[in-house]
Image (cartoon, rainbow, N blue to C red):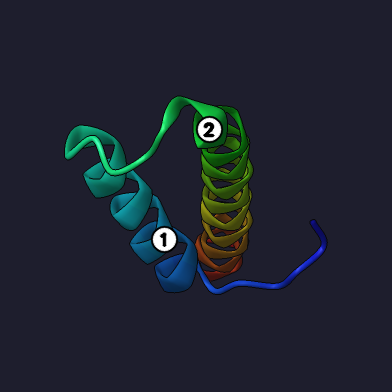
Amino acid sequence: MSEELSYKEALDELNSIIQKIESDEIDMDELSNIVKRALFLVNLCKSKLKKTEDELQGMFNELNS
């Protein structure tokens, strides 16, 4: 799973997965794969948030030095 999704695309897909799970649209045979995909998307979002946080912190540090 090395595809490059934007944060918004990943978040939109996560929301779609949540809706499917909550509405019982996913059968038990698919559930494991869907949860694996959701975990991948959550980790991708966390990584993008951390990268943005680090970049912003670096900019703020430059302003304060």
Which residue appears at 39% of the width and 51% of the height?
Answer: 14
Q: Residue at x 75, y 69 (%)?
A: 3
Residue 33 occupies quadrant: top right
- How packed mark 1 is, by other alpha carbons closer than 10 Å (few <14, some 14-19, many 20 or more), is some
Report the side of 17 relative to 4 (left or right). left
Task: Please state, as top left, top right, bottom left or bottom right, where the N terminus lies in the image.
Answer: bottom right
Q: Residue at horizontal 20%, vertical 35%?
A: 22
Q: Is residue 28 left or right of residue 43?
A: left
Image spot of residue 39 (x, y percent): 57, 35
Residue 46 x/y as whole percent = 55, 44
Q: Position of residue 12 (x, y in %)?
A: 35, 64
Q: Amino acid at mark 1?
A: Glu
Q: Residue at x 61, y 63 (%)?
A: 55
Q: Which residue is mark 1?
A: 13
Q: Residue 35 got which mark?
A: 2
Q: What's the CA distance linking mark 2 and mark 1?
A: 12 Å
Q: SS class of the residue under badge 1?
A: helix
Q: Amino acid at mark 2?
A: Val
- Judging depth in this view, the residue of 18 and 45 nearest the camera is 18
Residue extending farthest to the left is 23
In the depicted view, which residue is nearer to us: 61 or 18? 18
Q: Is residue 11 above or below residue 3?
A: above
Left or right for 29, reference 20: right
Q: Which part of the image, by quadrant, shows the C terminus? A: bottom right
Q: Residue 8 location in percent, x, y?
A: 40, 70
